[in-house]
Image (cartoon, rainbow, N blue to C red):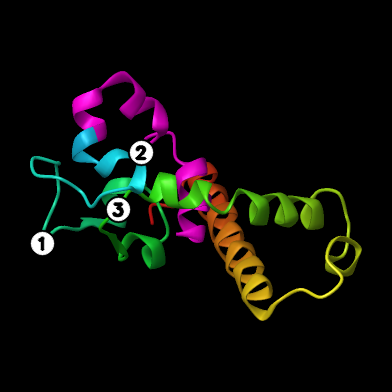
Amino acid sequence: MIIAGVWLSRSGRAWSCQDCDQSPELRRRRGNCGVEPFGRGLPHLRDGRVPGYRIAPDSDPEFAEESFDRCPVAGSMAFADIYQIYRALKVDGLTLADIIRRPTSGLVEALSALGHSSRLAHQRDMEAAHGDPS
């Protein structure tokens, strides 16, 4: 779910909370912000799951092959604190030791996954800007 935040935020056509705010019926089909599994009638629903490329078009193939049974937007919101730490490391130039004295291995792994996906998203943007057809 944490990687979903990278691909959802970079794609203008990705799922967003605004979609559900404007349509209570869509919100129910998407599982009420991750509280419930996806409901019947949701486009692209197969065996209770929606593929990543339908949730965030133009995502990296790694993410596109993922599938979700609950709203990844709501799931990625749960990681807001980790995104803030990642931003502090990348934008503000802090070190992990500046922020957290004893980071867990899970946090280090999450930050690594964010970094990897962010690099892939940047690479994808550069390819699109230069007309690369892939």
The C terminus: image quadrant: bottom left
Instruction: Look at mark 3 in the image and give the residue it sits on.
Output: 70
Q: Position of residue 29 (x, y in %)?
A: 18, 38
Question: Element type at marker 3?
Answer: loop
> Which element type, helix, strand or loop, lies under badge 1?
loop
- Asked whether the viewer can see residue 76, the reply is yes
Which one is earlier in the sequence, the residue at label 3 or at label 2? 2
Q: Position of residue 43 (x, y in %)?
A: 14, 42
The dot on residue 47 is 1
Number of numbered labels in the structure image:
3
Query: What numbered label is drawn on residue 26?
Result: none
Q: Does 94 appear in magenta?
A: no
Taking the view exactly as shown, the residue that stands out farthest to the front is 35
Query: Residue 15 shows which numbered tag?
Result: 2
Q: Which residues are magenta?
A: 1-27
Q: Residues within 10 Å of mark 2 (few under 14, many from 20)?
A: some
Q: Secondary structure at mark 2?
A: loop
> In this rendering, is residue 113 above or below 10?
below
Is there CB contact under 8 Å for labels 3 and 1? no
